[in-house]
Image (cartoon, rainbow, N blue to C red):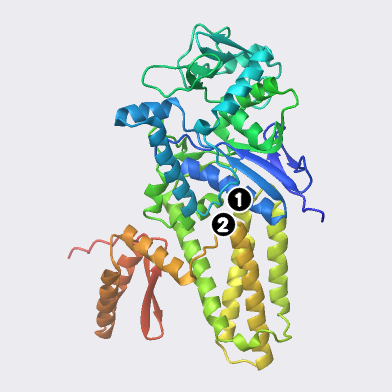
């Protein structure tokens, strides 16, 4: 097969960037820890999903055949507590929120993984792995519970760099004095009244938190696979415990690259349900287009913390509107020059340079640990500006050959931009005009207005200007701008578009006489 572009990824295990060398040439196996489905997903979940969706998309772009597994935890203490509060069956409740999460992923343009296993469907694999760990003398049973003996894991802590005594015993459960070592963690929990349970060699019960990912990753990808991903908060204890139990079940167990995305913070504090400072994906996409939220998340490198900010969401929304307005203008203009198609016309040298820069930058930066912010803020913006300069050129009178060259330049550059947007997951399947209309609808909602309100104010401003009351006209425009609505005078017509809200200068107090 053809030689692949080298992709460097940051490996948490070695704490350095490494060239990706898959176990099997041309194929990449990837497991990412998914959500515990007991409520609507929040922005932190969106961050993880978008981060690894970008990796998935870029690997496919490079020509790899990717097997991407992302699990659902549908058996867990939190789910059981929530179901008991609501008087619902835990598995029914969890299934409902699994679907809600999938709906959110569709909105955010995240591709469906190859497999999306649920814990409840993989009890046999989980029990088989626990049995193997016990047979290898790395776990013990107490009254129907099964615990992993961390003392049997000589390399425990190598991923996180933490010492064994740092382990937060139990993590999701109360400390159990019956354990041989306080750091030992549950592989199987004996059944309790009112909780779902499954038969096992140790009696009825359900899995501990960590074992599910070891069992399901081994089932779909074998014990040796390429990439294991998740949020940075999972490094310890979840991924550390995964390594320990997987190696206890199979000595040859190995993950080549551990990748972790950074936290989402709110006022520089980690956003989480336990702290009560989180926003659900739905809360955000109620006011901002899902593509704006995706753009916002891609605007920070996946390993860095991203601070939730209304101002940054506004900027992201404005950037997405600019992208789609440019694409629509390009499409509309090219439809007027259809006769150029098929002709032997060269693009301009400037257009060729712009395309080459975009291609080179995209490959160089994305292949350097997925540096999406550089693409969004530099070469993509340059390409969009160039497209708009071509559009302006075509509005002017020029020689036929120059016109044809500009059209061909526009065509080729447009294809390149759409290719980049596609890999970034920012290219909608909807018509450009429909996306623009959706963005305008969200802007109106944020402004607390309907379009008729804006149109009425446009008429009021036109009348004020006709009557030479320019002060009133300017005030109407400024008031709308402060709400994120920009008025644009195009010839004799005034149109509106969303914008980043402009803070008005405070009025100077009237002087006393």
Q: Closer to the camera, 155 or 476? A: 155
**Label 1: how many Cα within 10 Å (few below 14, some 14–19, many 20+):** many
Q: Closer to the camera, 238 or 246? A: 246
Q: Which mark is residue 425?
A: 2
Q: Quadrant of the N terminus?
A: bottom right
Q: Closer to the camera, 376 or 106? A: 106
Q: Quadrant of residue 232?
A: top right
Q: Quadrant of residue 240?
A: top right
- On the picture, is 149 further left or further right than 253? left
Q: Residue at x 63, y 77 (%)?
A: 411
Q: Is residue 125 above or below residue 433?
A: above
**In x, y percent, where is residue 34?**
53, 38
Q: Residue at x 55, y 83 (%)?
A: 335
Q: Is residue 267 above or below residue 442?
A: above
Residue 11 appears in the picture as rendered: no
**In x, y percent, where is residue 384?**
58, 69
Q: Quadrant of the C terminus?
A: bottom left
Q: Which mark is residue 54?
A: 1
Tag 1 and tag 2, C-beta contact below 8 Å: yes
**In x, y percent, where is residue 351?**
69, 75
Kindly report the distance in space between the C-alpha atoms of the residues bearing marks 1 and 2.
7 Å
Where disc 2 sits, the SS reads loop
């Amino acid at each position: 097969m053809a030689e692949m572009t080298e992709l460097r990824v940051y490996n948490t295990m070695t704490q350095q960037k490494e060239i990706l060398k898959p176990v099997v040439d041309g194929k990449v196996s990837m497991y990412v820890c998914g959500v515990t489905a007991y409520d609507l997903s929040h922005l932190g979940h969106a961050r993880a999903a978008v981060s690894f969706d970008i990796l998935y998309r870029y690997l496919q772009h490079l020509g790899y055949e990717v097997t991407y597994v992302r699990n659902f935890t549908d058996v867990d203490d939190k789910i059981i507590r929530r179901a008991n509060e609501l008087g619902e069956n835990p598995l029914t409740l969890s299934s409902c929120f699994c679907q809600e999460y999938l709906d959110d992923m569709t909105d955010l343009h995240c591709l469906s993984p190859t497999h999306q296993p649920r814990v409840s469907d993989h009890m046999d694999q989980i029990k088989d792995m626990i049995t193997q760990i016990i047979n290898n003398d790395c776990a013990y049973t107490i009254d129907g519970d099964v615990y992993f003996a961390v003392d049997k894991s000589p390399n425990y802590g190598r991923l996180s760099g933490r010492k064994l005594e740092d382990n937060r015993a139990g993590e999701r459960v109360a400390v159990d004095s019956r354990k041989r070592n306080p750091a030992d963690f549950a592989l199987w929990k004996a059944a309790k009244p009112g909780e779902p349970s499954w038969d096992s060699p140790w009696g009825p019960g359900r899995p501990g938190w960590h074992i599910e990912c070891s069992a399901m990753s081994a089932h779909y990808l074998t014990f040796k696979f390429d990439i294991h991903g998740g949020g940075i908060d999972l490094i310890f204890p979840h991924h550390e415990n995964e390594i320990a139990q997987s190696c206890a079940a199979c000595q040859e167990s190995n993950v080549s690259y551990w990748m972790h995305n950074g936290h989402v913070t709110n006022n520089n504090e980690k956003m989480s349900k336990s702290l009560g400072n989180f926003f659900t994906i739905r809360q955000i996409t109620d006011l901002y287009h899902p593509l704006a939220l995706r753009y916002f998340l891609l605007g920070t490198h996946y390993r860095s913390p991203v601070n939730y900010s209304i101002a940054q969401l506004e900027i992201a929304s404005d950037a997405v509107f600019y992208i789609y307005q440019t694409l629509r203008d390009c499409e509309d203009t090219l439809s007027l020059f259809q006769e150029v198609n098929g002709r032997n016309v060269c693009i301009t040298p400037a257009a060729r340079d712009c395309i080459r820069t975009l291609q080179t930058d995209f490959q160089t930066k994305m292949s350097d640990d997925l540096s999406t912010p550089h693409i969004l803020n530099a070469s993509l913006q340059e390409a969009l500006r160039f497209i708009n300069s071509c559009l302006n050129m075509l509005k002017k009178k020029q020689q036929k050959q120059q016109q044809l060259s500009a059209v061909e330049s526009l065509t080729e550059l447009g294809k390149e931009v759409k290719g980049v947007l596609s890999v970034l997951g920012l290219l909608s399947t909807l018509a450009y005009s429909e996306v623009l209309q959706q963005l305008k609808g969200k802007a109106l909602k944020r402004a607390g207005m309907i379009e008729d309100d804006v149109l009425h104010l446009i008429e009021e401003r036109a009348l004020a200007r006709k009557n030479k009351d320019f002060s009133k006209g300017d005030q109407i425009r400024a008031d709308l701008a402060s709400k994120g609505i920009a008025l644009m005078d195009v010839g004799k017509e005034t149109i509106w578009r969303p914008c980043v809200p402009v803070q008005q200068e405070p009025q100077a107090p009237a002087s006393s006489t």
